[in-house]
Image (cartoon, rainbow, N blue to C red):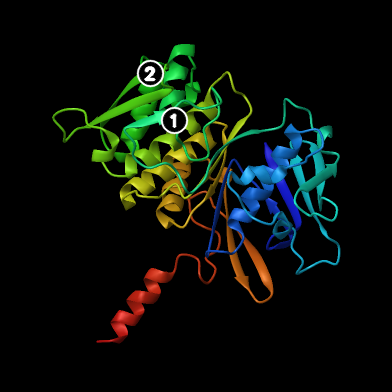
C-alpha cells in the first residue's frame, strides 16, 4: 500500500507530506491542488515503469502544452521537483528536471527501483472526463487496466467473464454467481437501482455494443437513451472490482469526481461502494466535490467498524499557496474536524435566506 507521499515544487504543491489510508478522499476548492497530488502519484508510477523516466508527462493523457509548467518556479530557486513515496516499509523518491535547453520533456532520476516490483501498486485510474453514452465502445489496449476515460469498461467485463476473474470473497455473498458481469450488475444496481446489462462483442470491428434495462423499462435500451449516469458509474464499478480480483493482488484505484451525473442518493451509494472496496483491502484514492460521497463512505465504514481505514485531506489555496488539512474519522463515523470552507456552503446560503425575512 502507498502510505505516504511527499511532494516538493510540483505545480502548486510547495512542500507537502500527505499520509494515505486504504480510503483517502481529497476535497477542496477548484485549483487548490487535489489533482496535482493525483498527477504526482501517477508520475511516480510512470517513472517506476520506465528505465530513465523520460516522457513522464504522458500520464496526463492529453497535450498539456509546456511541460516546464509542471515544475513550479514560485517557491524554490532550484528548477526541479521532488516526489517521495513510502510503500509498505520502503521509501524512494524521484527528482524531475527539464530536458536541457529545449525544456520539452521531463527527466526523472532517483532510487525508485529500490521498491520491490511485487509491492508497487498498479493504479487503475479514472479521470474526471469520462466517456459519455455511446452506441459502441472500443476494445482497450490492456486486458486488465481501465482507460482513464472508462471507454473500455464493457470490454473488460466481457474479458473478465471469459478469463474467469474472481473478485474478493469479502465482496460476495455465499451461493451467488462468481461471474464478473453478475457482480458488476449487482454493485451498479446497489448504486443506481436495479439494472441488467447486456454485452455484444464484435472483435472484427474492435467494438462492443452495450444495452441496459432498468426496472422501469420494458426492454433493453442503448446507453444514449439513459443519460450520463450509468455510463459514468459503470467504469468505476468495473475498475474497483478488478482491483479486488484475486489474480491482481496489488491493484489500487484512483478516481476523480465519482459523483459526476449521479443523484445525491446514488452519490452516497457510490461512497459506500468505494468504502466497501477499501474495507476489503483495495487502496482507493478519491478526488471529490461531493459531501454525499464522503457521508456514504463514513457511514459504510462505521457499520463495518473500520473507520480507521478512512482519511480526508481538505485543500485550500490563497496568496500564501496551498494548504492541506488532515481530517480523520472517529469510531462513530464522525469527522474529527470541520474546517472553514469544508462543505459549509449550504449553511451559509440558508443563513443568508433566513436573514432576508
Residue 90 in view of the camera: yes
Q: Circle 1 sits in a helix, a strand or a loop, which is it?
A: helix
Q: Residue at x 85, y 43 (%)?
A: 109
- In this view, the residue in front, 349 or 253, is 253
- Residue 157 vertical position relative to residue 5 in the rendered view, above or below: above
Quadrant hosting residue 94: top right
- In this view, the residue in front, 27 or 148, is 148
Q: Residue at x 28, y 39 (%)?
A: 224
* Residue 232 location (% of width, % of height): 39, 42
- Residue 294 vertical position relative to residue 252 in the rendered view, above or below: below
Which residue corresponds to mark 2?
Answer: 202
* Residue 129 location (% of width, % of height): 47, 48
Which residue corresponds to mark 1?
Answer: 153
* Residue 319 location (% of width, % of height): 66, 77
Crowd class of label 1 (few under 14; some 14 to 19; many from 20; radius 10 Å): many
Crowd class of label 2 (few under 14; some 14 to 19; many from 20; radius 10 Å): few
- Residue 93 vertical position relative to residue 237 in the rendered view, above or below: below
Q: Residue at x 50, y 34 (%)?
A: 277
Residue 327 in view of the camera: no
Residue 20 is left or right of residue 312, and the answer is right
Q: Residue at x 56, y 19 (%)?
A: 246
Earlier in the chain: of badge 1 and badge 2, it is 1
Specify the quadrant that holds the C terminus. Answer: bottom left
* Residue 324 location (% of width, % of height): 64, 62
Query: CA–CA distance between discs 1 and 2?
Result: 15 Å
Tags 1 and 2 touching, CB below 8 Å: no
Q: Circle 2 sits in a helix, a strand or a loop, which is it?
A: strand
Amino acid at each position: 500500500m502507498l502510505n505516504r507521499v511527499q511532494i516538493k515544487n510540483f505545480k502548486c504543491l510547495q512542500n507537502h507530506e500527505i499520509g494515505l489510508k486504504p480510503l483517502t478522499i481529497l476535497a477542496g476548492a477548484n485549483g487548490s491542488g487535489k489533482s496535482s497530488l493525483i498527477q504526482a502519484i501517477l508520475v511516480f508510477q510512470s517513472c517506476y515503469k520506465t528505465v530513465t523516466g523520460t516522457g513522464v508527462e504522458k500520464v496526463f493523457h492529453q497535450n498539456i502544452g509546456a511541460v516546464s509548467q509542471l515544475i513550479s518556479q514560485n517557491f524554490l530557486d532550484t528548477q526541479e521537483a521532488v516526489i517521495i513515496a513510502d510503500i509498505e516499509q520502503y521509501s524512494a523518491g524521484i527528482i524531475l528536471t527539464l530536458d536541457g535547453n529545449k525544456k520539452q520533456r521531463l527527466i526523472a532520476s532517483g532510487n525508485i527501483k529500490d521498491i520491490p516490483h511485487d509491492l508497487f501498486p498498479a493504479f487503475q485510474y479514472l479521470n474526471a472526463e469520462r466517456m459519455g453514452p455511446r452506441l459502441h465502445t472500443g476494445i482497450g489496449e490492456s486486458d486488465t487496466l481501465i482507460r482513464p476515460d472508462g471507454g473500455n469498461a464493457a470490454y473488460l467485463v466481457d474479458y473478465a467473464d471469459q478469463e474467469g476473474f474472481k473478485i474478493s470473497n469479502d465482496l460476495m455473498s455465499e451461493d451467488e454467481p462468481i461471474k464478473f458481469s453478475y457482480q458488476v450488475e449487482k454493485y451498479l444496481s446497489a448504486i443506481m437501482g436495479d439494472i441488467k446489462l447486456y454485452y455484444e462483442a464484435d472483435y472484427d470491428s474492435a467494438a462492443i455494443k452495450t444495452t441496459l434495462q432498468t426496472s422501469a423499462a420494458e426492454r433493453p435500451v442503448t446507453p444514449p437513451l439513459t443519460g450520463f449516469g450509468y455510463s459514468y458509474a459503470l467504469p468505476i464499478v468495473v475498475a474497483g472490482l478488478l482491483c479486488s480480483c484475486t489474480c491482481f493482488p496489488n491493484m489500487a484505484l484512483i478516481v476523480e469526481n465519482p459523483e459526476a451525473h449521479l443523484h445525491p442518493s446514488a452519490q452516497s451509494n457510490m461512497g459506500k461502494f468505494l468504502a466497501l472496496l477499501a474495507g476489503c483491502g483495495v487502496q482507493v484514492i478519491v478526488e471529490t466535490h461531493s459531501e454525499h460521497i464522503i457521508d456514504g463512505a463514513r457511514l459504510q465504514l462505521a457499520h463495518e467498524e473500520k473507520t480507521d481505514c478512512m482519511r480526508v485531506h481538505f485543500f485550500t489555496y490563497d496568496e500564501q499557496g496551498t494548504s492541506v488539512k488532515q481530517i480523520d474519522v472517529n469510531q462513530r463515523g464522525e469527522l474529527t474536524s470541520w474546517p472553514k470552507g469544508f462543505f459549509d456552503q449550504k449553511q451559509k446560503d440558508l443563513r443568508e435566506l433566513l436573514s432576508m425575512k
